[in-house]
Each structure stands twice: as C-alpha cells, then as structure tokens.
Amino acid sequence: MPLFFRKKKPSEDSQKRLEYQLCLSKEAGADDILDISNCELSEVPSSAFSICKVLQKKVLILHNNELRSLLTKGCDILSLATLKVLDLHENKLSSLPEDIGRLASLQIFNVEKNLLKTLPASIGDLRLLQTLNLKGNCLSELPSSIGSLSSLRTLDLSDNSIIQLPKALAYIRTIESFTLDATKMSYPPPSVCLEGTESIQRFLCNELGEDYCPPSQYLLPVLENDSTSGKQNSDCLDGLEATWQNKFSDYERRKEQKQQEKLAFERHLEEKQKQHTQLLLMNNSHKENVLNSVRQEQERLEQGVNQQQRAQEAERLLILQKVRQAEESISFRISNMLMDNNRQAKSAEFLQAMEEERIRMEQLTAITQEETNSLRRREVAAAMQKMLSDSCALSLLQEASDFRRRNLVSEACRSLENMDRKFDKVLSLQVLDKSNAITQILQEEEMQKAAFQALQLQKDSVHGYIRNQIKLIETELMQLTKLEIKRRNLDTENLQEVLGEQRTALSDLLQQLLKQKDQREQELRQVLVELELKSESNQQNYWMIQYQRLLDAKPLSLRMQEVGVEKELVNLLCKLSAQHYLPILAHNRVTTEALRHMTSSDLKKLGINEIGIQKALLNWAQEHRPEGACKVAQQDEVPEIPSTVPPPSPLPSLSNTSTIQMPSPPLTPGTPVTPSAPSPVEGPGSSECVVCMETGSQVIFLPCGHVCCCQVCSNAMQSCPLCRSEISQQNSGIMSLPTLLILYGSQTGTAQDTAQRVVRQAQRRRLQVQAMPLDNYNVTNLISESLVVFVCATTGQGDPPDNMKNFWRFLFRKSLPVGSLSRLDCAVLGLGDSSYPKFNFVAKKLHKRLQHLGASLLLPVGLADEQHDLGSDAVIDPWLKSFWDRVYALYPPLADVIPLREDEQLPPTYTFHFLDDDREGRRPTEDSHRANCPLPVASLCCQDDV
Ligand SMILES: Cc1cc2nc3c(=O)[nH]c(=O)nc-3n(C[C@H](O)[C@H](O)[C@H](O)COP(=O)(O)O)c2cc1C
C-alpha cells in the first residue's frame, strides 16, 4: 500500500447507504449479516468492527469497495472472530493481515479480484475454511501452510501468476474443486492440471509418496457447531449441509428483502426530490408572475406618466394660447383706447359744437340758464376727467413701451459693438497670419530663387569653363611671380623678361576672362529676370520648379562620364533597379577594379546608402576578378568619349606668349588643363606676402599679374610692390581664405560659449569669422555661404532652443529644394546630456537635414555630453581638432597663415566701462563698444583655448 494516498470522499449515495446498513445491522432482530458493500469505502469503518464484535455477526460483506487493507487502525482482527463468511471481492487489497488465521470460525473467504501478491502463513490456521476464492489476484506462489486447510473444498487460483503448486496441497484431502490456469502451470505439468482436481491431487500425493484417497472419504468438520467441538460426524453431515443451505438461502432472501427496502427508500427519495423540483418550479413560476406583474405595473405607470406629460403639454399649449389671446386682447384694448382717444378728441370737437349750440340756445332761451349751465359744466368736467385719466393711462403705457424699446436698442447696440470688436480681432489675427504666411512664402521663394541662381551658376558650362580657366591662369601667375622673385635674386635678366612677358600675357588673358565671367553672370542674371517675368504671378514654388528642371537636366560632361562607365556595371545597376546611382559612379569614375578595393563605408561616403546595393556591388566586383580588372584599368586611363563631343581646348602654350589667343569657350568644360609653367615645389598661395612676410600671397594684382600680397596687406596697396605698376583690379576670389560663419542655438548659454570658443580659434588663425544665434541670421543667405559651423544645444524633451526655433521651422519645410545647400561646407556640434532620452536630438537631426539638402558635412556630428566624467569638453576638444584638420585640408593656403602668437591678445568679447565719480548712481554698462567709450576700459576676455 502506498504510504500516502488520498482518501477519496465517498459519494453522498454511498454514505447514505453505509449509514443505512450500519443502522439496519444494529436494529433489534437484525440477522447476523453486516452488508456494507458498494459503499466506496477506502477502509473498514471502526463501527463495523464493534458491530461484528458486539452483535456476533457471522457474515461480513465488503465487496465492491476501495479497501486497501482489511484492518483499520486501532481495530483488532479478533473483533471479527465470529465471522463465518467474509466477502472481500473487488477491492484493492494488496495483502491480508498476518494474523488472518485468528478468524477461527471462517468457512467462506472470498478475496476475488484484489491485488494480493502473497498470502500470510497463518492462513493455514483457518481449519474450518471450506471455500477459498483467490481468483484474479497477483499471487505468484502459495505458502506451504495452505496444506493445513483441512476442511477446504473449493479453491480457486485462476487469473494469478502461479505456475507452481506447493506439494503440501496433497494433504488437503477434502478438496473437491480446484480451479487454476492449467496451461500456464509448470508444476504439476499442464497435462496433469488439465485433467482436473483428482489428477492434480494424485500427482501431488505421488510426489510425496502418499496414497491418494478421494475427498468423499473424508468428513468435514461440523460447520454449524462451535469450532471447539470439532467433532466429525458422518451421520449428521448431510443435515448440516442442508442447514447451511437453508441459512444461506435465508441470507439471500433477507438480502433480497433489504434490496427491496433499499429500492423503496430510493423511490421515496426520488419522490421527495420530484416534489422538491416541483416546488422549485412553482416558486420560479411564481417569481416570474410577480416579475411580470411588476413589469406590467411599471409599464402602466410609464404610460400614466406619459399621459400626464402629454396632458401637461396640452395644458401648457392651452395656457400659451390664452396668454397669446390675452396679449392680443390687450393690444386690441390698446387700439380701442387709441380709438377712444380719437373719439374723445372728436367728442371734444363735438362738445365745442355743443357749447356753441348751447350759447346759441342760451341766447335763444334764457330759461333755466344757470341750471343748464351747471349741469353742462358738470357733464363737461366728468367727460374731461375721464378723458384725462384715459390719456394718462395711455401715456404711461407709451412710456413703458418706449423704455422697453430703448432697452432693446441699447442691448442690440452693445452686442453689435461686441461683435464688431470680435470681428476686428479676428480680422487683425487673420491679417497677422496672412502677413506671416506671406513673409514665409517670400522667404521661401527667395531661398528657392537663390538656390536656382547658385545652381544656374554652378551648372552653366560656359561659366564653369571660365572659372577653370581663371583658376589655371591664377595658378600660372602665382607660379610665375614666385619664379620671378627667385630669378630676380639670380639676376638673370633675359629670363626675367620672358617671365614678364608671360605674366603680362597671362594677366591680359585673366582680365579678359574676368570680363567674360562678369558678362556671363550678367547674361545669366538677365535670363533669371526673363524667367521671373515669365513666371505667372500666382504660380507657387516657381523657383523650386525651375531648380528641379535644372537639376533634371544632366550636364553633358556628366552624360559623357556616364558613357565611360563599364557596360557590365551599368547592367548590374539596372538589374538592381539602382540606375539613379549611375551619375555617382560616373562622376567618381568608379570602375570594377576600384570597387574591388572599396568597402561599404566608401560607397556610403560616395552617396550609395542602400546596404543591399552596396553589398551587391562589392560582391559583383569580387566575382569579376582578373580579366575585367585589366580592361577597367585601361578604360580608366582613357575614358571613351563620343566623337560628337569636342575635346577640351588646351590652354595655349605659355612659351609662345606673343601669339596667345583667348580660347573660345567650349560647349563643355573640359578636364582641367595642366599649368604650363614649371611645376612649383609649393602649392598655390605658398609664397609669403612680400609686405608682411607672414601670411601667404593670396591676391592677384591686375594688370601686372603679380601674386605677392596677402589679403590684408593688399587692401592698402595702390601699386604692385614688385613692379610698381598701378593696380587697376585685385582678384582674390579663388585663392582667398573662407569666411567662417558660426551659427548657434543656445538656451542657457553653453552653446553660445562654445561658439565663442570657435570664434577665438578662428581669429587666432586670422580667419574672417562671425557668430550669431540662428534666428538672427537671414537663412536665405545660407545658400551662398561657404563654411559654417552649427553649434546647437538640445532642450526640453529633444526640442531646439528658443533662439533657433524659427530657423528650425524653416529648415524642415518640405518645399526646400533637395540639394539647395550643395555649395555649403559645414559641420554640426551638438551639446546635450545623455541622461535625457533624446540625447543631442537637435544636432543629430540638423546634421541629417543638412546632408539631405546637399550640404557637404566635413566631419561626423559632435555629440558633447554633460554626463561625461570630463564634461562636454571631452568631446568638443577632439571634435574641434578634427574640424580644423578638415578645414586646412580644404583650404591649403590656410596652412601658410602664421597664427597669432600665444601672447597676442584677441579682441575682447566683453568690455566693461567704469564711469566717472561725477556720474554716480549709474551702473557700469556691459558690452558697450570700446570705440564709443573714452573712459578707461577693463576688458574681460575669455581665456584663449586654441
Ligand atoms: C530643461 C532642460 C532640458 C534638456 N533636455 C535635453 C534633451 O532632451 N536632450 C539632451 O541631449 N540634452 C538636454 N538637456 C541638456 C542640455 O542640452 C545641455 O545642458 C546643454 O549643454 C545646454 O546648452 P545651452 O546652455 O546652450 O542651452 C537639457 C537641459 C535642460 C536644462
């Protein structure tokens, strides 16, 4: 038996049955049977033990329960000592009590269909046992003590695992019926077992060397008598058997009777349940009825309420009608009174007539004059009184109506005034909105126009060509000047002359080209004006459309370059649906060979952002290795140009200066021409200014063509310091240093300070520099800026600072042309705090947007973090260093500029003015301009941190 098993709670019916049976067995006159079968018992109730003991029960029926053990805790097996019949079939017994042999009276023992594995040895003590049913258990062997069951007649061992019988069975001489699974047996052999009980017994006797005697020769013990008597009496054997049969049939009968009683009880129970169900049904229907009646009552009430409401409504209408009638009757009365009034007026006339008549009558009859007079006077007075009271009431009514009218009019006036005020307000708001929208549109249009203009200049092939030529000539002139200075030292006059001639020729050429450039720009401006005139006044985004058209028209040079792209590469792009990258590949002259040495980031830098396409291109290049590489290299060297396109005009040889002709501009700007002057060791602008000897030469003087002065010194020059010829024109466009613009967005001043820091660094490098908040800057000028640093903080939850909000709104307009900032070199430095979820959001977004608008970002966005252990400078310092490296790479002449010495003071950022004593009471003013202040100046200048 398992140590822990959950006792299953018997069902209600089983419990009832158990109680019923226990009660029944205790009743006076009850038989010797205790039948507690089919009660779902997991153990024998202790009360059953006491009942058996006290009432000396002979039959205990426990079949069809859940018993795992016969004995219950605290109960003694001797309580069952009187039992003759013990029926335990169909339970879950896995063992029998070790002292089962103490049931000395037991004659019939049924343990069929249990889980018995072994039998206790004491079973052999059951000397009166006649029937032992062990069928359907798990027994594999029998104890040899079984041979002591000297009264056993019937033994059923079938449906067990027994394959061997103990030889001691031969000692049971009374056995008549022996049931076992003959075929499974090994001892005695199946052949013996199949022949039946006698054969088995014979076999076993034989095995023991005993003689076999049939059971009929052995007498059974007297069943009915006490076991103690134990005498065998062959004469009364049949009688005993009959008595036993009677008893058994009596037991069966009583069992039947009990069954009937039980059925009757169950019927009774069923009836009760039916009654209960009927009662429930009745109760439900009654409840339903009550609910229905309540519902009906409610409906009736609702109807009543509705009727009442209708009646009240009708009454209200009636009253309204009556009021209206009363009003009508009042107005009718007023009109009557007015009529009365008229009538009275008439009666006054009539009275006057009467008076006249009276006078006439008086004159005629002087009889009873006084009486008549008094009578008349009274009548007239009464009539007058009535008339006066009527007119008084009338005037009161009129006054009241006047007053109401006045009230109404003033109210109407007031509401009209309110309405007017509101209307005015709305109107002014609208006007404000409109003017805002107009300024925005104008700003946008201006930007688009500027973008168009810039692009037009950039795209114009003639202009481009002229620019190239100017650049070349400038370079030539510069080199010539350098050579000339060197030669001068060597004093080689002839060469000097030649060089002078070359320089003059080049200067002439440069002048012509500059003129042509101006002319071309003039023409383009004219085109612009014409376009403007053509544009319909109401057409939106006119410049945007023109800009797009211009963008769409690929320059011939690019088309030529596209022709030069390898066919296979073009096919691959088509296959990848990435034809739009063809111009990029063409422009950068990307070949299969070049691709093979490139990485994804290289392609990204070129503007091929889609990772899939990057990978496909790189893989393709790797797959097309050796033969292709050779071909591509050749193609790279000599790009195939269609014959229809004229080759670029070479610059005339400088050695032949007398025959220099102004080259006519070709249809397309060709590849830059190599300067003909001897290759200089240093780059352009690398010779130092002959005046200050510090900065590189940056300005070309015309007409002499000398390049010998820096930007600053050249301003004061009227004649060339080398040749003393008068300066008619200074050309500094190409070789000049950029003007750096620093635009910042700052909420609490940190970004502004950082911007000032960049300003100081620029000033140290002698660069023209300007810094201002983004919203103070006219954003439409951005198109024409060359170098800008954006220093932007993030505030709120990823919001731009207040002083860049307008700029922010403007920059993210959808109508801004993509690529409109293509001439701008810039960099973005963000100030933020990584403890905020949107860390440096503004700087990151600005960086992306500028990229989208075509600006070229010199370096990745700087993301300064206040949370860094070293503060924001941990990022700002290296970022600024990289920025200046990039600027130096972009503007090589800057390398020749000798920066300010450490001890040289920069112009102060802030100045403080101390006021005279006689101006007491006035506070020192901050940021007053030094020039305007005659007083001692204390300058508060931030520490230089270059
Ligand atoms: C109210 C407030 C909100 C801020 N929100 C952010 C933010 O969303 N993201 C971020 O990176 N930094 C945020 N910061 C940190 C600032 O960007 C950082 O302190 C910066 O240096 C301030 O520059 P400023 O003084 O020029 O405004 C916030 C700071 C403050 C005071």
Image: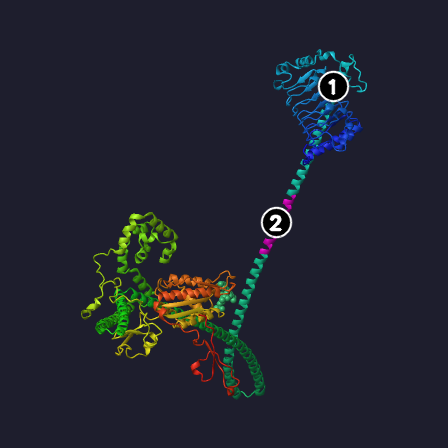
Residue 303 is inside the magenta segment:
yes
Q: Amino acid at mark 2?
A: Arg
User: In the image, which is nearer the foreground, mark 1 or mark 2?
Assistant: 1
Q: Is residue 943 visible in the rendered structure shown here?
A: yes
Q: What residue is at 38 percent from the left and 54 percent from the top?
A: 600
Q: Indicate the colouring scheme.
A: rainbow
Q: Is residue 566 visible in the rendered structure shown here?
A: no
Say left or right for 921 vs 291.
left
Question: Residue 148 shows which numbered tag?
Answer: 1
Q: How many marks?
A: 2
Provide residue 366's location: percent of width, then percent of height.
Answer: 55, 88
Residue 431: name its quadrant.
bottom left
Mark 1 touching mark 2, by CB under 8 A? no
Question: Residue 295 shows which numbered tag?
Answer: 2
Question: Residue 114 shows which numbered tag?
Answer: none
Q: What residue is at 63 percent from the left and 49 percent from the top?
A: 294
Provide residue 839's location: percent of width, then percent of height.
Answer: 48, 61
Q: Main secondary structure of the magenta part?
A: helix
Quadrant showing the N terminus? top right
Q: Nearer the viewer, residue 637 or 923?
A: 637
Q: Note whether 258 is above or below 658 in the view shown.
A: above
Say left or right for 50 vs 656.
right
Label 2 neighbourhood size at 10 Å, few (<14), some (14-19), many (20+)? few
Quadrant showing the C terminus? bottom left
Q: Earlier in the sequence, mark 1 or mark 2?
A: 1
Residue lying at the far left in this picture: please name it: 659
Q: Secondary structure at mark 2?
A: helix
Residue 442 is inside the magenta segment:
no
Q: Magenta residues? A: 286-306
Measured Cα–Cα span from mark 1 to mark 2: 85 Å
Q: Note whether 326 is above or below 571 in the view shown.
A: below
